[in-house]
Amino acid sequence: MTGICDKVAILGMGCSRFGERWDCDAEDLMLEAFREASADAGVEARDLDAAWFGCYFDDASVGKSALPLANALRLKNIPVTRVENMCATGTEALRGAVYAVAAGACDIALALGVEKLKDTGYGGLPVGTPGTFTEQWRPNTSSPGSFAQLASAYRAEHRVKGEDLKRAMAHVSWKSHLNGAINPKAHLRRAVDLDTIIGAPMVAEPLGLFDCCGVSDGAACAIVARPEIARDLGKTEIVTVKALQLAVSNGSEAGHEGWNGSYIHCGRLAGQRALEEAGVRSAPDEIDLMEVHDCFSITELVTMEDLGFAEEGKGWRAVLDGAFDRDGATPCQIDGGLKCFGHPIGASGLRMAYEVYLQLLGRAGDRQLPSPSLGLTHNLGGEPARCVVSVAVFGRSD
Amino acid sequence: MNRLGIVDAAAYVPSMRLDRGAIFAANSWANPALKGLARGSRSMCNWDEDSLTMGVEAARRCLAGRSRDDVSRLYFASTTPPFADRQSATVIGEALNLSEQLAAVDLGNSRNAGMQALCEVLRGDRQALVVAADARRAKPASVQELQYGHGSAALLLGREGSIADVVAEYRLTRDFVDQFRGSGEDFDYRWEERWIRDRGLREIIPKLVQGVLKKAGVAPGQLARLVLPAAPPRMTAAMAKALGLPPEAVQDGRLGDVGDTGAPHPLLLTVDALAESSPGDLVLLVGFAQGGIALLLKATGNLPRWQQRNAHRLALSPPRPESAYTKYLSFSGLLPMDFGMRAEADAKTQLSVFDRHRAELTGFAGGRCPVCNTVQFPRSSRCVNPDCNAEGEQEVVLLADEPGTVTSFTQDWLAYTPHPPLQYGLASTESGARVLMEFTECPLKQMQVGLRLRFVFRIHAIDSHRGYRRYFWKGAPAPNEEKT
């Protein structure tokens, strides 16, 4: 197995402004993201050979099938594949496009993710069903409640005091608010002080309001091709996909006592596989920035351990020490993350890739980091006990 | 005598005890005369309890530590069964994992249904379980709201090891309509209290008592204990006096801390009476509704051993004071609270799916991998153990009576539950099964990883569009974790 490393380049990327987009439909968001990517890539809709379309809440959003993307962009009757893998849907769309290009099945492919959550009427995410049998016995969980359990098990496993973990979680959100404040496309653009975060109303113990990410409207996309095509199109600064991995739970975490609930098993697996595929020997030494799935502050904290950026059980200390702040050892969520950029589910994985892409090309404006060369994205769907986790690595390959 | 006797007995009263002062405080503007009843507390179902789940709980307590193999009949008595057409006794039988050949019968339509079920069962000769439960609703600001309570009781009848034998039974069948509830109606309608007392209780009960005593050849003075229908102590004392018995002989009616539970009430008081009796004592039970039933019992030499064992079971549910009257109204379906859009989600149950998984859902049956012995829920064709994953027919493992512990938890204010916050997390059973489940009856501050659990059969979701409700098991703090 040779993997995907350096077989596919990103020709261009686009991302809509995230937030409460009362002004438009999902189709407008798709166009907004595509226009930017198209201009960046120098590629029009008619040049695309195939497309992958990611959207999670089909019924509450654009409807089923690949039609919404084909219609919004008036694609030339090319093959369009609809993908859905919970909150990792965006990366799943990218994976489809990247694999097709790497296989030589097409030259130029589009991956686009969109979600119009604010039209559902819910403050958080709408209620779904886990399946006709499962729903007859599982509790009526919410996303914050599902991830809050990580905190309870983490406290117990590592004997961390509730108030210490709460402080570390607050630091995670505090840092992302600082980052989001200088991102013009972010949903939440206000710095929030630590006392406000810690004192916020409880959503699901121990997650308060500021431990939860924004629920937003938005779209993001990538146009990909093999590196030689990128060069033929005149690209001189080339970002390639170094790794693109996905790990999916098989029920053992939720149904077997081998898992203690304090970490994300598939996050660890996807991370290990991706770093290996990218040829990264030491993530903390080689990865310059990362965008991880900070749906909740505790998720980001635990992910720092799962991906090897902090020692197991010590992630909370590393967070408090500022290791993942914008001036820390490995800046995390430099664009504000799900927390503040926002979380339009189908778009999020592509939004993460977008920020890494901008940073690698030196186009991140006020939030630009000094010459990063390798960035990682981590996109998690589901809940700690039953999840799908994508980890991707992107780098410069000029 | 080769008749059936009471072999075991248990009651269950929900932990939540609503302060009657709180009921009065909310309603005094409408009816200040309720003040006289505003003492003590009454039991109320949690949102996830109904007469069926309370029946399961009483039955489990009654059968604790016993083989269930010989329970061949199950009678369930209630005037508030959750379904008009879906027998509760059948569901209770499956929750208890009783035999599929079980004779399951529901009795209702009378506050005396519990006593009637007991008498019906006594006519047979095979081991039988009598379960009675009621969760009667009452109009806000009514007298019944203050007088009623929710609860259940279960008696196991058998031929061996009786703790109380039946001496005689006497009946009076008369359509004396002191109160009624029309079909499909929510509330009872009651006639004037003084008339009920004078022409009902004072006329019918003495006849029942005299009738049964005469039949048994027993003099009133020989009675050790008298279980009378729910009535103020002043009135029951007067009835005892008329029979020449001291007021102490009347079993306390549990009106102060529970309330009148309806169909289970005589059986619930019987459990109390047995707990306080001595071998050889004659205990007279009297049930009242459209006439009545009198049943004379005699405690046997097995009673002290049962009392010793039962002391633990009686302590299973220490009461938890509740003063939120609107919580009671909401749980009773009398106050449409705004729980947000998440409460709108459809709770439709796919019945064909339910049927395929009945053993898991109702009986809490897990599976044991034939290769690595890992116990798992749900049962699976491929083992969940990541080091095994073998394919094979898994042996059934019943999980309901295993102790459990909390592995992870949250208290979720976002997810919909009629009793926020929704508490849930991963629970582990003693045999190693791991189940994401809801927790119930746990004070918020008590919840922690490692908390020991006892599994209880509760309502999982209510489908208000179709009048259906589904049940499943939840983790509740184990008795030794409960604090009074």
Image (cartoon, helix red, strand yellow):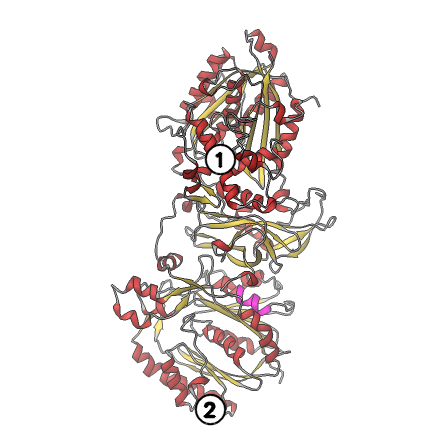
Q: Tag 2, which chain?
A: B
Q: Which residues are magenta?
A: B56-63
Q: Nearer the viewer, residue B458 or A322?
A: A322
Determine the CA span between mark 2 and mark 1. Answer: 77 Å
Most extreme residue toward the front, as rendered? A321
Q: Name the residue carrying label 1.
A: A171
On the question of residue A63 being in view, the answer is no
Q: Name the residue carrying label 2.
A: B220
Residue at point 60%, 24% (across, down): A287
Q: Picture coordinates of residue B273 (x, y %)? A: 50, 79
Asked if marks 2 and 1 fall on the same chain, the answer is no
Q: Is residue B398 left or right of residue B274?
A: right
Question: Is residue A86 rendered magenta in the image?
Answer: no
Q: Picture coordinates of residue A166 (x, y %)? A: 49, 41
Q: Picture coordinates of residue B305 (x, y %)? A: 62, 78
From this view, report whether residue A99 is shown above or below residue B471.
above
Which three-letter amino acid code belongs to the residue tagged 2? Pro
* Mark 1 residue crowding within 10 angstroms, few (<14) / some (14–19) / many (20+): many
Q: Nearer the viewer, residue B124 or A11?
A: A11
Which three-letter amino acid code belongs to the residue tagged 1? His
Q: Picture coordinates of residue A218 (x, y %)? A: 44, 27
Residue at point 64%, 51% (across, down): B433
